[in-house]
Structures are given as C-alpha cells and as structure tokens.
Image (tube, rainbow, N blue to C red):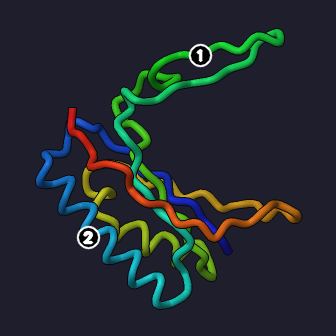
Amino acid sequence: MKFMFLVYSDEKAWTPEEWNQCTLDSARICHELSEKGQFLGASPLHPVATATSVRVRQGKRLLTDGPFAETTEQLGGYFLVDVPNLDEAIAIAARLPSAQKGTVEIRPLYELIGLPTSDKGLEPDSKRSNK
C-alpha cells in the first residue's frame, strides 16, 4: 500500500545545523527503504515564504504569495513509501527526525489507473535557506 508522509514543523524551530543533520538522517532512512523496495520518493520543500497559492473563483485566477493559511507548523516536505500496511508506515514515520520537532501526517494514496509515469528523479536545485 502506498502512503505519503506530510512533514510539518515550525521552520524557525530548526538551526541550520539541525536541519542539515535532519536531511542526512532522513536520507539514510530513504536508502534503507530503497534497499527493501519501499522507497518511492521524498523531498524537502523550500521555505513557506517562497510559496504561491492559486485559487480560481468565478472563473478568475487568484494568486497569493505564501501559504493559504497561517499556522504555527508549515508543510516542509514529503516522503512516498510503499509498505504492506499502516502499522509499518507508522513505524517508519516515527523514525523520521522531523517527527521529533514537528508532525508527520500519514495519508494513504488512491491508486489511479492511466496516469503517466516518470523516471525522472528529483534533484535539489539549491541548499535550503533558513529564514
């Protein structure tokens, strides 16, 4: 079963050193999952200040800089895994360093037939800036 882990935390809660260690520890877990054939993808997100929100109301496109809602925790990244059940997903999510400073929300994915597939990997385009 495929699950998405949505990682939330207060961006200001991480020092640059802590964030760097978090990415290293998370990458190690991703490699472990990959060896078991359970890793599908993962990536941290740029800071919430770089976000653009899009809404369409009455046929008009509305753009807003930043996130839609003001919250104390921001969506900071995601993981995609393919594991047998929710219990295993919970065990993996609890190992992620970000669970210690924030929240890891686990959501099962619907399987949609007929969508295109991609063999392109995600490569980071710059180091995260801590604001």
123 and 6: which is toward the camera: 123
118 and 33: which is toward the camera: 118
Label 1 sits on a secondary structure element that is strand
Q: Nearer the viewer, mark 1 or mark 2?
A: 1
Q: Which residue is mark 2?
A: 25
Quadrant where the N terminus is found in the figure: bottom right
Q: As displayed, is residue 121 above or below residue 104?
A: below
Q: Which residue is mark 1?
A: 63
State the residue at coordinates (39%, 32%): 48
35 and 122: which is toward the camera: 122
Q: Position of residue 78 (x, y in %)?
A: 47, 55
Q: Position of residue 112 (x, y in %)?
A: 83, 61
Judged left or right of residue 10, residue 112 is right
Q: How many marks?
A: 2
Q: Residue furthest right?
A: 114
State the residue at coordinates (34%, 30%): 72
Q: Position of residue 3 (x, y in %)?
A: 60, 65
Q: Position of residue 118 (x, y in %)?
A: 68, 66
Quarter location, residue 91: bottom left
Quarter location, residue 130: top left
Q: As displayed, is residue 129 above or below residue 85?
A: above
Looking at the rendered structure, the kind of residue marked 1 is Leu
Quadrant where the C terminus is found in the figure: top left
